[in-house]
Amino acid sequence: MAAAAEPGARPWLDGGAPRPGSPACSPVLGGGGRSRPGPGLERVGARSPSPAAAPGHSFRKVTLTKPTFCHLCSDFIWGLAGFLCDVCNFMSHEKCLKHVKTPCTSVAPSLVRVPVAHCFGPRGLYKRKFCAICRKGLEAPALRCEVCELYLHPDCVPFACSDCRQCHQDGHQDHDTYHHHWREGNLPSGARCEVCRKTCGSSDVLAGVRCEWCGVQAHSVCSTALAPECTFGRLRSLVLPPACVRLLSRNFSKMHCFRIAETVALEPGEGDDSVDGGAATGPGRETLAPAESSKQTLKIFDGDDSVRRNQFRVITVPRQARSEEVLEAALRAYYIPEDPGNLELHALPSQAGDAWARAKAGSARISEEEEGSRGPGSCEASPEAWVIRALPCAQEVLKIYPGWLKVGVAYVSVRVTPQSTARTVVLEVLPLLGRQAESPESFQLVEVLMGSRQVQRTVLEDEELLLNRLWDIRQTSLRQVSQTRFYVAESRAAAPRVSLFIGGLPPGLSPQEYSNLLHEALATKGAVVLDVACFAEAERLYMLVRDTAVQGRLLTALVLPDVLHWNLPPDSCPLLVFVNPKSGGLKGRDLLCSFRKLLNPHQVFELTNGGPLPGFHLFSQVPCFRVLVCGGDGTVGWVLAALEETRHRLACPEPSVAILPLGTGNDLGRVLRWGAGYSGEDPFSVLVSVDEADAVLMDRWTILLDAHEAASAENGVAEAEPPKIVQMSNYCGIGIDAELSLDFHQAREEEPGKFTSRFHNKGVYVRVGLQKISHSRGLHREIRLQVEQQEVQLPSIEGLIFINIPSWGSGADLWGSDSDSRFEKPRMDDGLLEVVGVTGVVHMGQVQGGLRSGIRIAQGSYFRVTLLKATPVQVDGEPWVQAPGNMIISAASPKVHMLRKAKQKPRKAGTSRDTRLETTPVPEGDPK
């Protein structure tokens, strides 16, 4: 524990400028080096602090037996000696010791300015990444925060800071000015320091820092030379500023707030901030010693909670070690910065040892790297079990943090005695914070537990004795002490308001019918937003909706924030991102995570979780925004259809839409220069291209399907199908091409797990095409075509295709480039569709090979197709069998605004530039 501070106020070090920290830097770190930062409270009589240049570290000189790199400068350590922190494994040159500003893991929680919990996704393999707690490489499956660049071993999660990015205002220390949010390490090996322009990244150690908002990279020492305010960098016009988002999420986890699906069940210990899986090694992850060696293995508990859960840390110490040495090793294992003089080890009752033996019985030898291990499998006897206990004390020095910003101090220190209550502490603190003129009754003392997965706030009763409260916390968990803070906050309660989006409801009902449905099954129109004025009720409705099905379909429940559009900067045009994770194999899932980190996660939506409507509702009051759709042509059509439905409710009724093609054909992406398909480009470069893209217009077409009778009926009697309307952007096919698309769609529905690559998908298309190569049905005898109410005689064809863009079937030019006096030159914004025929599969293959073009039939803006028989039809890659009847195709208004990727000027040979510099777009015309 840090040295005892005298009661009084302590200013932010260096005027509040942010400094790099470890394991995961907080938005503002005060640990510049004048004094050792401590946790939320201090024991009177604590030991002296560590040297100022090494905040919280316990360095000792060690002999190096393998190649080692410095964690400060990332250079190789020549010679046989280095300096290692016994707690967090920070390694340094001797010459670098005086420059170390990165705080030790044990004191990092005390440097968090605004506690924000992390959102850990499922375990995964992350090559050449390092744990932010123990600083070791991630060789086994590890965890990654879905919002920030934090990587952790599973057993290190309980010791992580609650220092994720603050992406919205939640009523607790809200502010308009944002500082750099530094995160240490895991930079690209070629990263350049913004200050000295030297390499600051490393693939060998956890070194260098990066701002998780603007992306600026620097050495930890150099970062102190940068201005503390963050401007959000190159993507500032695309980012939804956190000060413009409000979400009161008291009863909802960050996973719910960011709409991150919890697809994987949590393993033991992962649901909270307890130590994972029972036993875990200490910070050095040392090998467990066999029984016959000169060392012994002990299991250590840090309080009643860990004993009850049977979750402990394993340490290895010499058999002749003194009790003080064992205690210090136990504190290092739990990253506890307490003075050992205030603590002692208590042997657990025999029942705990028996539980240990039972848990271990029958187990094989387990490596120390495996989670959930129950001890050293080679030991025959049960290792000794001990619990760390705090010694009683008559008084403590408690740090009280202001619950509002711009106070000029980080915290004030007050002495707590057995008579001190929450009310007396508030009365003592207010004058120190300059609020002595205000009524003490309008303030309250709040206890905040800063867990890595959840930040819990508890308002203390006025008469609660604080010394007893602190003793209870220590008895429960000593580790919890360093993660607990006390805030004095204004007691005025913010009016609770939670917006719940409910989707998956049947469309087409009247308002009264939806109201009745809401009372009966908690449902409303196809999608609706409920504003709930009670946190508890909002949580109840949320859980109820997720377990409710209407007409056999589970409803969707999402927590949506409010966008404070009046706070947006004048030049802001935030990007609304939709990602279909099912497109492009696993690339969609990776892009979803990347865009959440590059932008505000509130502006990134997963289409499989509620569709596009929640995103358009969130941005409904934003005066100017753009849209990025990550998926195939069908996904793009889905989003454009939702945009058409909600256009009249948007303050920006005509947002421009960009495409990141993840599908198989990606014809619209090809036309707009976004490429034939995403192949792993840097997501940051993709966003820069979106920002520089040119706006173009594109026609949208409405297809009215009016079937005379159903394709089939159960009782043999034909039944009329209700008319329906679909929207078209690219093309509409009738006949053989729709039949191939239908066969492919059915094959994918039967075995969706096999359709994870573009190459495999195209192979399936070839296979189904070969099966139809001799197929002939004489489509021209089964349909009738009218163009502008004029009958058109059809040649002998097997497929009829209406095209709006000059790309069909994965990039083929079906219309052809030859001039023809009968028709105008095609454009995608000319209000005309081109009608082309194909004679069969062989003809289609020749078109896709560039050997032939289709048979030009007509050009117009209004078409009527009469189907005499049930015929396969596909629109933008979505196929079905259409019953006999009429298809009426007409232009929809207004045209949609699309974003076409700008051409880049070629760079001179031998030149290089930072990927974050702007590129120069080259204007061009608008060919179709």
Image: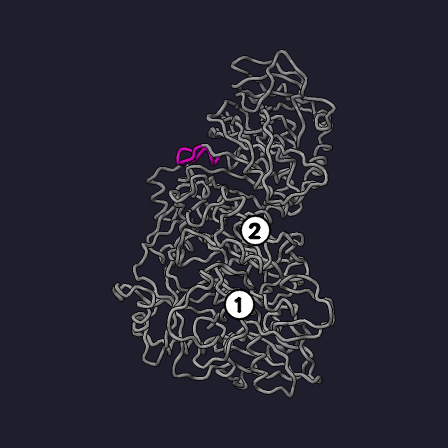
Residue 294 numbered tag: none
Residue that appears at 51% across and 56% down: 181
Does the CB distance between marks 1 and 2 fall below 8 Å?
no
What x and y, as percent, mark residue 366?
67, 72
Question: Magenta residues?
Answer: 641-653
Type of colouring? one colour
What x and y, as percent, mark residue 407?
37, 61
Residue that lies at the very extreme toward the top in this rendered image = 821
Identity, as a three-letter code, of the amino acid under mark 2: Val
Q: How far apart are the alpha carbons under marks 1 and 2?
A: 29 Å
What x and y, as percent, mark residue 476?
45, 76
Whether the magenta-drawn stretch holds residue 319 is answered as no
Dividing the picture into quadrants, the one containing residue 404 is bottom left
Above-or-below relation of 209 to 792: below
Tell me the mark number nearer the camera, choosing from 1 and 2: 2
Above-or-below relation of 21 to 241: below
Relative to the observer, which residue lies in front, 861 or 628?
628
Above-or-below relation of 664 to 816: below
Q: Main secondary structure of the magenta part?
A: helix
Circle count = 2
> Is residue 458 something one can see in this rendering?
no
Disc 1 target residue: 158
Dividing the picture into quadrants, the one containing residue 899 is top right
Residue 216 numbered tag: 2
What x and y, as percent, mark residue 560?
42, 49
Report the quarter where the C terminus lies.
top right
Residue that appears at 54% across and 34% down: 637
